C-alpha cells in the first residue's frame, strides 16, 4: 500500500501516541488517562461533538459530513483497556506499571481510529454522520454493554457499526473476515459441591466431595462429545478446583470454576441445560449436593452478511482483493463488540499484524506498521458507505 499523504503527515505523531498509551496501560473501566487523551485529541482534531463518560469512561466523537442528504449514521468502534499481565516485550515503550500491559493491541486499535477521525474531521468528504466509539472494559468487563445501557444507541441511532481487531501472524497488509459467527460466546461456570467431611481413614463415614468432583469433570466433557451435534461447536473447560486443607481430612466442600464457549445461541442454551442436569444428577448419585452458577458474559460475535460484504469491499480497496480472506474460520475467543452487533447490523474485520507473539502473551507488542493500514481501512469504509 502506498501510504496516503494524510497518513504520512500523521504517522510519527500517531506512532508516539500509541506508544504513550502502551507505556501507561489501564484496566477495565479505570481508563481515565487514556479516555482523557482520546477526548483531547478528538477536540483538537475539530470533531463536531465529543461525549465522555458513556459507560463510565467511554468516549464518543461525532463527525458530520459536508452534506447530510441521506441522513445515515455509521459507527466505528475501538477498545481502550489493557490486561493484568506483566510485560516482557523489552520494548523501549514497555509498560511503566507493574502487572499491566497492552497485550491485545487495544492501544493500536485506539490509535488507528483516532487517526481516521482526524482525517474525516479534516476532509468531511462524505454524506451523513460518523460516530467514533472508544470503549472501555472489553477485557472481561462488558464495556460495550455498559455503553449501550448508558444510552449510546439511543443518543446515536446508528444504521450500521463496524469493528477492527489486529490478528497476529496474519501477514501485514492482509485482512480476514467472514459472515455469521466469528467469535464465541463467553460464559463462566461455578460449581459448589457439598458433601460430608471427615477423617480420610474412614471414608465410609463421609460423602467425599472430591470423588463427586472427579466424576463431574469427566461427565461434563460428554456434553460436547455426546449431546452436541458434531457439526456444531462447544467448549466446556473446568479450570480451577479448590477444596481441602490437609492430607488426612476429607473436605466438606469443593468449588470448581470454568468456562463455556459456543458459536450458536441455541447450543449455548443446550450446554447450560445439560450442565445443570449433570451437576444435580451426579451429586445426587453420591448422596451429595451441588449448585451451578451459570454466568453469561459475552454473546456470540455474529457478523451481518451484508455488512461483511461491505467491510470486505473497503479492505479490498485498501489492500487488493487477493489480500482479503472472506472465509475466516471462527474462534472460541470472545469479543464484547458482540453486544453492539446484537443491536445494530455490522461486522468485525481482522487486520494482519505480521509475525508476533500471540494476543494476551507477555511478549506481545502492537506492530506500528499496521497503523496506516487500519487508518486507511476506516476512512475507505466511510467513503464507500457514505459516498457523497
Image (tube, helix red, strand yellow):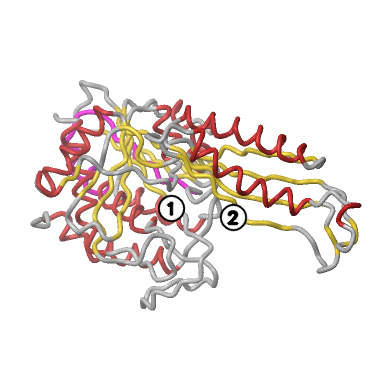
- Gap between marks 2 and 1, in whole Å? 28 Å
- Residue, x 20% and y 33% (percent of image)? 310
Q: Quarter-wise, where is residue 282 in the image?
A: top right
**Position of the N terminus by quadrant:** bottom left
Mark 2 vs mark 1: in front: 2
Q: Is residue 193 above or below residue 383?
A: below
Res. 59 mark: none
- Residue, x 30% and y 55% (percent of image)? 167
Pick whichever of labels 2 and 1 is earlier in the sequence. Answer: 1
Q: Circle 1 is placed at which residue position?
A: 80
Which secondary structure, mark 2? strand
Magenta-drawn segment: 117-136
- Residue, x 53% and y 43% (percent of image)? 260
Q: Circle 2 is placed at which residue position?
A: 239
The location of residue 185, given as percent across then percent down, is 47, 39
Q: Residues within 10 Å of mark 2 (few under 14, many from 20)?
A: few
The location of residue 7, given as percent across then percent down, is 17, 56
Q: Between 286 and 11, which is closer to the camera in this rendering?
A: 286
Q: Horizontal placement of 4 versus 141: left or right?
A: left
Amino acid at each position: 500500500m502506498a501510504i496516503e499523504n494524510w497518513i504520512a503527515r500523521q504517522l510519527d505523531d500517531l506512532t508516539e501516541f500509541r506508544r504513550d498509551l502502551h507505556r501507561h496501560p489501564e484496566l477495565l473501566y479505570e481508563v481515565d488517562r487514556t479516555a482523557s487523551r482520546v477526548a483531547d485529541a478528538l477536540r483538537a482534531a475539530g470533531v463536531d461533538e465529543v461525549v465522555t463518560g458513556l459507560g463510565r469512561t467511554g468516549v464518543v466523537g461525532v463527525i458530520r459530513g459536508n452534506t447530510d442528504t441521506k441522513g445515515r449514521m455509521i459507527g466505528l468502534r475501538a477498545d481502550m483497556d489493557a490486561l493484568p499481565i506483566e510485560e516482557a516485550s523489552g520494548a523501549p515503550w514497555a509498560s511503566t506499571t507493574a502487572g499491566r500491559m497492552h497485550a491485545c493491541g487495544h492501544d493500536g486499535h485506539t490509535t488507528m481510529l483516532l487517526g481516521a477521525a482526524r482525517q474525516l474531521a479534516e476532509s468531511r468528504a462524505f454524506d451523513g454522520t460518523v460516530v467514533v466509539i472508544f470503549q472501555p472494559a472489553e477485557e472481561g468487563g462488558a464495556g460495550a454493554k455498559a455503553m449501550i445501557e448508558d444510552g449510546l444507541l439511543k443518543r446515536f441511532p446508528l444504521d450500521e457499526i463496524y469493528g477492527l481487531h489486529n490478528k497476529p501472524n496474519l501477514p501485514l497488509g492482509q485482512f480476514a473476515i467472514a459472515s455469521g459467527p466469528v467469535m464465541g460466546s463467553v460464559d463462566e461456570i461455578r460449581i459448589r459441591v457439598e458433601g460430608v467431611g471427615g477423617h480420610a481413614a474412614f471414608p465410609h463415614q463421609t460423602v467425599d466431595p472430591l470423588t463427586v468432583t472427579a466424576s463431574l469433570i469427566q461427565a461434563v466433557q460428554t456434553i460436547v462429545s455426546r449431546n452436541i451435534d458434531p457439526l456444531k461447536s462447544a467448549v466446556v473447560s473446568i479450570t480451577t478446583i479448590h477444596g481441602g486443607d490437609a492430607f488426612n481430612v476429607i473436605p466438606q466442600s469443593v468449588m470448581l470454576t470454568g468456562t463455556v464457549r459456543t458459536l450458536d445461541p441455541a447450543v449455548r442454551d443446550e450446554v447450560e441445560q445439560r450442565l445443570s442436569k449433570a451437576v444435580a444428577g451426579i451429586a445426587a448419585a453420591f448422596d451429595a449436593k451441588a449448585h451451578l452458577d451459570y454466568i453469561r458474559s459475552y454473546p456470540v460475535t455474529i457478523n451481518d452478511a451484508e455488512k461483511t460484504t461491505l467491510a470486505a469491499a473497503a479492505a479490498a480497496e485498501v489492500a487488493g482483493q487477493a489480500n482479503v480472506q472472506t472465509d475466516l474460520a471462527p474462534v472460541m475467543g470472545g469479543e464484547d463488540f458482540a453486544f453492539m452487533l446484537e443491536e445494530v447490523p455490522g461486522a468485525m474485520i481482522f487486520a494482519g499484524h505480521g509475525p508476533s507473539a500471540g494476543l494476551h502473551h507477555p511478549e506481545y507488542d502492537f506492530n506500528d506498521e499496521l497503523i496506516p493500514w487500519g487508518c486507511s481501512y476506516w476512512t475507505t469504509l466511510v467513503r464507500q458507505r457514505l459516498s457523497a
